[in-house]
Image: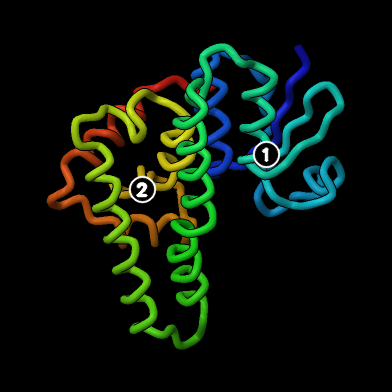
Amino acid sequence: MDLRIWRIPFSTNVERVALALGHKGVAVEWIDVDPADRSEVERVSGQPLVPVLDDGGTILFDSPVILEHLERRFPESPLYPLDPARRAEARIFVDWFNRVWKRPPNLIAAELEKTEPDREKIERLGTEMHAALDLFEDMLDGRHYLLGEFGIADVIAFPFLKYALGVPAGDDELFHEVLFEHQPLEGRPRVEAWIERVDGHPRS
């Protein structure tokens, strides 16, 4: 097997792939990249973002694309439900998380980088993040994982929601500070327990 993945420290999208590979029991060669020098990533993939997967000469980037490829390549210990209706629901969640949920924290981080951030806009976007946490809390009512059994929804969401518990030492990403500041866990015990539960899963 010839799997190589380029990564940078603390990347949420890299952790998605590491969780998926750990769940499937697939080994990979990790190639660490200096966040300040992504020339190797650009040489390999034509763009600067990680993760980048090299699967025997097939080059892929963008974590959802990589996850779909890994699901096809290694179908054992599936990330998606086998039932077509539930699989469709999982795809809807993935699309919602990537297109809708990620928008507020990204916009808050962009706003904070301005000389004079719009505090009202930040507060409004933060309220959207709080509301999303309530949705996750409800999704976990009577469940250990977001869609019942561990799978793609947990892999997609965990690397972002885990920052509700704090930012690790050495992680100076503004985006991660935003995730911490705007995801209060008070009154959301199921989300907190889910974060700790998923954190116990293996990474490749």
Q: Identify the image quadrant of the C terminus.
A: top right
Label 2 packing within 10 angstroms: few (<14), some (14-19), many (20+): many
Quarter where residue 13 is shown: top right
Image vertical order of residue 141 relative to residue 38, above or below? above
Image vertical order of residue 74 relative to residue 7, above or below? above
- List x then y, in percent, for residue 122: 37, 76
Residue contact between numbered discs 1 and 2, judged by CB atoms under 8 Å: no
Q: Amino acid at mark 1?
A: Val
Q: Which residue is at the front of the view, 107 or 204?
A: 107
Q: Residue at 44% across / 20% down in the picture?
A: 202
Q: Secondary structure at mark 1?
A: helix
Depth-wise, is mark 1 or mark 2 nearer the camera?
A: 1
Figure disc tally: 2
Whether residue 9 sits left or right of residue 62 in the image: it is left
Q: Residue at 12% across / 50% down in the picture?
A: 187
Whether residue 181 sits left or right of residue 14 in the image: it is left
Mark closer to the chain start, 1 or 2: 1
Residue position marked by numbered label 1 in the rendering: 65
Whether residue 10 sits left or right of residue 33 in the image: it is left
- List x then y, in percent, for residue 19: 50, 27
Q: Amino acid at mark 2?
A: Tyr
- What's the image's color scheme? rainbow
Q: Secondary structure at mark 2?
A: helix
Q: Identify the image quadrant of the N terminus.
A: top right
Q: Residue at 43% across / 83% down in the picture?
A: 117
- List x then y, in percent, for residue 165: 28, 45
- List x then y, in percent, for residue 140: 25, 37
Q: Which residue is at the front of the view, 40 or 126?
A: 126
Residue position marked by numbered label 2 in the rendering: 163
Q: CA distance from mark 1 to mark 2?
A: 24 Å
Q: Residue at 36% across / 32% down in the picture?
A: 147
